[in-house]
Amino acid sequence: MPDILHQPYWLTMGPLLVVSVTAFVVMILEFIFLHGNRRWLVWPSLLGTLVAMVPAVQHFAAKPTAALNTMLVDGFASVFSLLILISAALILLFSYAYSARQPLAAEHTYLILFGVAGALAMASAFDLITLYVGLELLSVASYVLIAVRKKSVRSVEGGVKYLIMGSVGSAALLYGMSFIYGISGTTNLVELGQHGSELYQQYPAIVLLGFILMLCGMGFKLSLVPFHMWTPDAYDGAPSPISSFLATLSKTAAFAMLLRMLLFIFNGVTSDVFYWAGILAAVTMLVGNLIALPQRNMKRLLAFSSIAQAGYALIPLALIGPNYTDWTGLFDSLVFYLFAYTFMTIGAFAVVSVVARARKTHTDDALQGLFQQSPWLAGALTVFLLSLAGMPLTGGFLGKFYIFVETIHFQAVWLGILLFVTSIISFYYYLGWVRQMFRKDLDTRGEAAVIQTHPVMNLLLGLCIAGTLALGIVPATLLHPLQWVQWF
């Protein structure tokens, strides 16, 4: 590690520095321009996010570098940082279009950026303390963003529930970290990785307890079953852009932090402890899809859908156990799925927000005959739903397929079968929405005007559709760059 500490800090911390500075600048601008419409603050925020992507892309195939002995930029950090920044850019576009009809508090823009800064720290840090600070920065921003509509009971309720459950998760995570620190005397992940198997040989029960506590603590952030209870209320109460923020960007950062912690700390004991992640993934896939079946509220259904999707994304981590010498395929499958999940989830939330506002209901009745009234919205939502279900020619299908192949390769066929079965279950509620949108006999809203969409919303939907279909039809657009990544 000392031989790389001479690298300039801006090379290793570029994305985090750019986003942090942008967040403070936007916050100051928000205080300066107290009166009038401050939606324009999204544009400097978006500019800062795009600029931050440059150093992230530059480090895709670069040699790992470190700064301040706490931040590490390797291929793992670069890939996850890029995905986090792409998610942030899409969410900022979403919030701008959304606030044209339903005003959001001006503070939401810089709170999103501070959350992004925390997420970037979670992807890049290799010290437990720094990781925890990044997690708390993201969490605190999320608590406020959910409850930003102070006059909405559902919004405040969702924020309070997430605050309570998130605090429990943070406490469990910190408790697990304390056990690892107590037996090792260090919080540096590199040092922990060098002595992981020794610690397990000396203190097997404590290492296992630390693993379970850390996995459960992050389970609250990932909405894994049984730590998911806050999710439907928080997603339903929050403004739709913030719901998509929680479902995509927050989850991506949590997966990055969980994967880095567990791989570095427990890289010598995977065959003994990582099967717990497989059990958690199985329960999450099954329960998430079954609870989604009777849901009529569109945002709550997407919330339970995101729970099930988190179970799918957890499978690659569980597969590390049988063979921890070659993880490249697992990383590729996880990253591919998270990219596809980001595009299709943000797009689905965007369409649902437009339709719910136009038809003044959040139940799936709002989708009846949508194709007759807005073919563009109906077609876009169909693409996202088919991808979430795992239909061919979509990113969601290939993402699940790659994960399924890895379950066979690592001799965990039972997880692959469960992934297949639960995906079939999800077809019931996803295709139920599609059927409602394209039923021609339902013309109860034929007299209503065509649903108008904001130009920025059209741009957002176009980008999400392009990302979803490109990953399904030309997966090499992402897989080829991943071949050059030096993960660690």
Image (cartoon, rainbow, N blue to C red):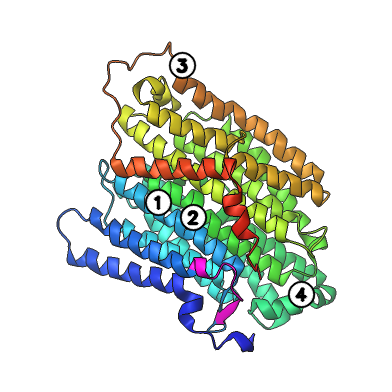
The reply to whether the C-beta atoms of the residues labelled 1 and 2 are less than 8 Å apart is: yes
Q: Picture quarter containing residue 175?
A: bottom right
Q: Residues within 10 Å of mark 2 (few under 14, many from 20)?
A: many
Which type of secondary structure does the marked residue at label 2 adopt? helix
- The residues colored magenta run 56-66
* Earlier residue among tags 3 and 2: 2
Which type of secondary structure does the marked residue at label 3 adopt? loop
Q: Residue furthest top?
A: 441
- The residue carrying mark 4 is 196
Between marks 3 and 4 in the image, the one whose residue lies nearer the viewer: 3
Residue 232 image position (x, y, % from top left): 50, 42
- The residue carrying mark 3 is 439
Between marks 2 and 4 in the image, the one whose residue lies nearer the viewer: 2
Q: CA distance from mark 1 to mark 2?
A: 9 Å
Which type of secondary structure does the marked residue at label 1 adopt? helix
Q: Residues within 10 Å of mark 1 (few under 14, many from 20)?
A: many
The reply to whether the C-beta atoms of the residues labelled 2 and 4 are less than 8 Å apart is: no
Say whether residue 333 is visible.
yes
- Residue at point 39%, 68% (across, down): 19
Q: CA distance from mark 4 to mark 1?
A: 39 Å
- The residue carrying mark 1 is 91
Residue 227 image position (x, y, % from top left): 60, 50
Q: What's the mark number on residue 208? A: none
- The residue carrying mark 2 is 249
Q: CA distance from mark 3 to mark 2?
A: 34 Å
